[in-house]
């Protein structure tokens, strides 16, 4: 448990997020072609310029007729019509339909003027196999009367000119892009993707693939952050060398990061006591950065501010080194800022769950790794094991983070608590 005087020095999680979001500036927009638009965030309002379908068209393969001509048609008393026109998909009718005439027509082909209904092939003696390359019969027998408008998709039935279709902030899915194509658009305005440089720091870190020796561990944070940045549509600039716990090394890696012209730099580790001075020294040199102690578990220390980049200020987040702390602080404090910069409006997903077992906290706002099960219509949350901030495995097994509010030390089994879904982590 934390002492009350220590707790008082900690910044509330919501206040920290508010301050971070107040600094998150919407990135400019750019125009991209439709094939580049998937997953991008729409920066303009899309309204239909024209009706869709753009003309009255047939919903079936069949014969366009004047409904009054076939009003008396029955299986025993068919009406005979002269097939005078042949309208294939993609073609316009050669002329208007006259009384006593039918036009062979394919699905999606424009209905000739004068016709007000389409009879399905099955309701004529033309039979199946209405093959466009086969010659049209010269006469047909119609076995059934038709309602006005039958089997016709009228112009503007799906979309009318001026109709609002998509709003800014929408993450474009394939079906949205298809709608843009339907409207004849070739390009759309979307927000720029955030360029995020990712830096790991620590003398103990090795790249996967290097031989492990006493005291060394592999860099996990870079791989978590690279994936998370990409998952929300950012560009991860992650091919930077690991910064060692020396001023020159940290300065060199941060310089390299700034040369990549990022919008944001995220570094992990090296800002808690111990090595703190090294990274802090360099940050003070390169910009203006504050160290916050946030009332959050796991992940108390957070560095936030700006560095001077080549094109202006670059937002900076210094996250804790322990992988779970880095992931939780990213999820709670960094991701909302990146989403806002990219114009996205998605919000975190929460649910109410029942604690499946007794859980404890230290008075900070805690985000505990839990697995969710459906039991008798309720969502029940169970700990995934050790809540140590280095235990990445218990994060891997988690479906959600259970939020234990500030000043609560025990959650008894059966208590209702809020959980935050974690499916992206
Ligand atoms: P620090 O903030 O430098 O004191 O690091 C806290 C803990 O996180 C230490 O046990 C580090 O070894 C560990 N750590 C720091 N960076 C990484 C990383 N990139 N991947 C995995 N563990 C890390
Ligand atoms: Mg370290």
Image (cartoon, rainbow, N blue to C red):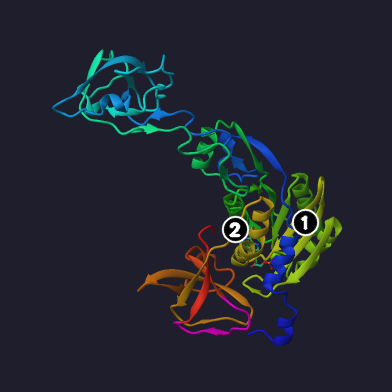
Q: Which mark is residue 353?
A: none
Residue 294, quarter of picture: bottom right
Any part of residue 126 in sight: no
342 left or right of 352?
A: right
Residue 241: where, in percent of width, then height?
A: 70, 50
- Reading the image, the residue beneath label 1 is 250
Q: Quadrant of the N terminus?
A: bottom right
Residue 228: where, in percent of width, then height?
A: 59, 54
* Crowd rating for badge 2 (residues with CA inside 10 Å; few <14, some 14–19, many 20+): some
Q: State whether the magenta stretch is mostly helix, strand or loop.
A: loop
Is residue 276 positioned above or below 408 on the image? above
Q: Secondary structure at mark 2?
A: loop
Measure the alpha-carbon separation of dots 1 and 2.
18 Å
> Does the beta carbon at disc 2 come under 8 Å from ligand 1?
yes
- Reading the image, the residue beneath label 2 is 220
Q: Quadrant of the C terminus?
A: bottom right
26 left or right of 62?
A: right
Say which label, 1 or 2, has the lower sequence index: 2
Camera-nearest residue between 423 and 272? 423
Camera-nearest residue between 208 and 105? 105
Is residue 313 positioned above or below 29 on the image? below
Is residue 373 positioned above or below 207 on the image? below
Highlighted magenta segment, given as a residue range: 404-414
> What residue is rendered at 46% in x and 32% in y?
155
Residue 106, quarter of picture: top left
Q: Secondary structure at mark 1?
A: helix
> What residue is rendered at 62% in x and 72% in y?
298
In the picture as drawn, the residue positioned furthest to the left comes out as: 76
> Does the beta carbon at disc 1 come under 8 Å from ligand 2?
no
Residue 409: where, in percent of width, then height?
A: 58, 84
């Amino acid at each position: 448990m934390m002492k009350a005087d220590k707790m008082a020095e900690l910044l509330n999680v919501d206040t920290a997020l508010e301050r971070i979001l107040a600094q998150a500036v919407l990135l400019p927009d750019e125009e991209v072609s439709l094939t580049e638009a998937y997953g991008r965030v729409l920066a303009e309002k899309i309204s239909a310029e024209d009706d869709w379908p753009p003309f009255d068209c047939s919903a079936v393969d069949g014969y366009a007729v004047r409904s009054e001509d076939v009003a008396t048609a029955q299986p025993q008393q068919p009406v005979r019509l002269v097939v005078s026109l042949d309208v294939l998909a993609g073609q316009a009718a050669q002329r208007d339909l006259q009384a006593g005439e039918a036009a062979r027509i394919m699905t999606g082909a424009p209905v000739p003027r004068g016709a007000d209904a389409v009879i399905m092939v099955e309701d004529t003696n033309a039979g199946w196999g209405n093959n466009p390359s086969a010659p049209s019969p010269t006469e047909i027998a119609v076995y059934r009367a038709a309602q006005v408008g039958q089997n016709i998709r009228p112009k503007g039935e799906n979309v009318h000119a001026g109709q609002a279709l998509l709003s800014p902030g929408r993450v474009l899915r394939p079906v949205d892009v298809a709608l843009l194509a339907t409207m004849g658009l070739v390009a759309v305005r979307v927000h720029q993707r955030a360029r995020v440089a990712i830096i790991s720091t620590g003398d103990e870190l090795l790249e996967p693939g290097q031989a492990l020796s006493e005291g060394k561990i592999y860099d996990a944070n870079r791989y978590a952050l690279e994936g998370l940045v990409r998952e929300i549509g950012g560009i991860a600039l992650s091919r930077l060398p690991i910064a060692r716990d020396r001023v020159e090394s940290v300065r060199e890696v941060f310089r390299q990061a700034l040369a990549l012209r990022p919008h944001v730099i995220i570094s992990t580790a090296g800002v808690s006591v111990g090595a703190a001075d090294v990274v802090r020294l360099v940050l003070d040199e390169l910009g203006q950065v504050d160290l916050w102690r946030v009332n959050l578990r796991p992940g108390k220390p957070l560095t936030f501010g700006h560095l001077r980049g080549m094109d202006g200020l670059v937002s900076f987040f210094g996250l804790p080194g322990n992988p779970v702390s880095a992931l939780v602080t990213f999820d709670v404090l960094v991701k909302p800022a990146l989403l806002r910069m990219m114009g996205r409006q998605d919000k975190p997903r929460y649910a109410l769950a029942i604690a499946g077992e007794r859980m404890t906290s230290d008075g900070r706002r805690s985000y505990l790794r839990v697995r969710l099960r459906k039991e008798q219509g309720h969502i029940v949350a169970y700990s995934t094991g050790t809540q140590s901030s280095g235990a990445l495995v218990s994060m891997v097994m988690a479906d959600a983070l259970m939020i234990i509010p500030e000043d609560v030390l025990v959650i008894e089994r059966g208590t209702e608590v809020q959980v935050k879904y974690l499916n992206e982590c």
